[in-house]
Amino acid sequence: MKKVLLTTTALVMTAGVAAAEISFSGTSQVSVSDTNGAGNEVNTHTDLNIAISGAAENGMTFTTSIGYDAGRQVDAGDFELDALEGGMSAAEPSVGIAYNGVSITVDGAGVDDLYNDDVTSGDVAVSGSVGGLGIGLTTGLSNGDNNSSMKLSYSMGDLAVSYASTNNSDALAGADASLISVSYTMGDMTVTASSDDDGVTADPVTKVGVSTKLSALTVGLTMASNGTSDSSIGDDYNISVGYSAGGMSASLAVDEDSVTELSASYDLGGGVNAFIAARSGTTEAGANKDFSAFGINFAF
């Protein structure tokens, strides 16, 4: 949910700006979690976002946003408790400009890398599309910032292909990396394949997967190599079953280490969502993956 404020005076920067829109949105969470059997921990979190957008008479549009995060929250998708947050979520807010199908994003704190969006590559991103071809590029303009990435994607009917590369895959050593992926949909079934040369492992990680929808159920199987020189497809795998009907959604997954993941959520209406998440098991390397949590999310 969001609250919207329209103004034609306070945010008018030039005579060419017709109007600006300000929207307020956010989330709050109350949760109880337990990581590796260390005991229950109660957490609260609030995320407030303010988005500003406007359009000039020549068709050019602009967007920017600021946010405030406070507290800790459960990341049910990754079965973990996020780090403690406090204060503005972006020291330098990004500014987006779009014109005639081309979008430019500028962010002094860094834009998302097109190979790995957990890291940043440069401070300018450009994207656009021609027919079924999508093109993206990030690059640095600041002194000493030579991080860059690119992505090409193409879709034709049920077939989709993409290629991404970067010179900053891990945000540490600045490793070169590339990823090519293909997906094809046949009715309720989707087949995927990818080759990921992350610049760190000895060989690229090759992955194949298939998923199919059976009424309210979705069943999936993914098999992959692990990147070592003697690895083959199937050394790593994941089997999952998902369910979605009405306000209820749930999923169960198990991998080659017999680490089991279970999550479920229920929409209570009015922007309120209750969830549970549990993971149990130990990896072959001996890492304890136990995690459990339950809580309520509020959206406004």
Image (tube, rainbow, N blue to C red):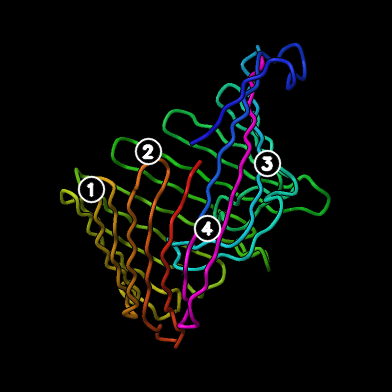
Disc 2 vs disc 3: Cβ atoms closer than 8 Å? no
**Element carrying mark 2:** strand
Between the C-alphas of marks 4 and 2, the distance is 19 Å
Q: Residue at x 57, y 27 (%)?
A: 4
For the residues labelled 3 and 4, the Cα–Cα distance comes to 32 Å
Real-space Cα separation, disc 2 to disc 3, in angstroms: 33 Å
Residue marked by disc 1: 245
Asked if residue 31 lies in the magenta stretch, the reply is: yes
Amino acid marked by disc 4 = Ser
Question: Within the magenta stretch, is there residue 277?
Answer: no
Q: Secondary structure at mark 1?
A: strand
Q: Which residues are magenta?
A: 30-56
Looking at the rendered structure, the kind of residue marked 2 is Ser
Q: Nearer the viewer, mark 1 or mark 4?
A: 1
From this viewpoint, which residue is outermost toward the right? 143
The amino acid at mark 1 is: Ala
3D distance between C-alphas at marks 1 and 2? 29 Å
Measured in 3D between alpha carbons, the distance from the residue under mark 1 to the one under mark 3, in whole angstroms, is: 35 Å
Indicate which disc, 3 or 4, sits on the residue closer to the N terminus.
3
Judge depth for marks 3 and 4 and give the one in front: 3
Residue located beneath label 3 in the image: 66
Q: Residue at x 77, y 16 (%)?
A: 14
Q: Earlier in the sequence, mark 2 or mark 3?
A: 3
Q: Residues within 10 Å of mark 3 (few under 14, many from 20)?
A: some
Chief secondary structure of the magenta span?
A: strand
Helix, strand or loop for disc 4: strand
**Mark 4 — residue?**
178
> Label 1 crowding class (10 Å Cα cut-off): few <14, some 14-19, many 20+?
few
Q: Position of residue 162 (x, y in %)?
A: 44, 47
Q: Name the side, left or right, on which 228 lies relative to 92.
A: left
Q: Earlier in the sequence, mark 1 or mark 4?
A: 4
Residue 22, placed above or below residue 298 = above
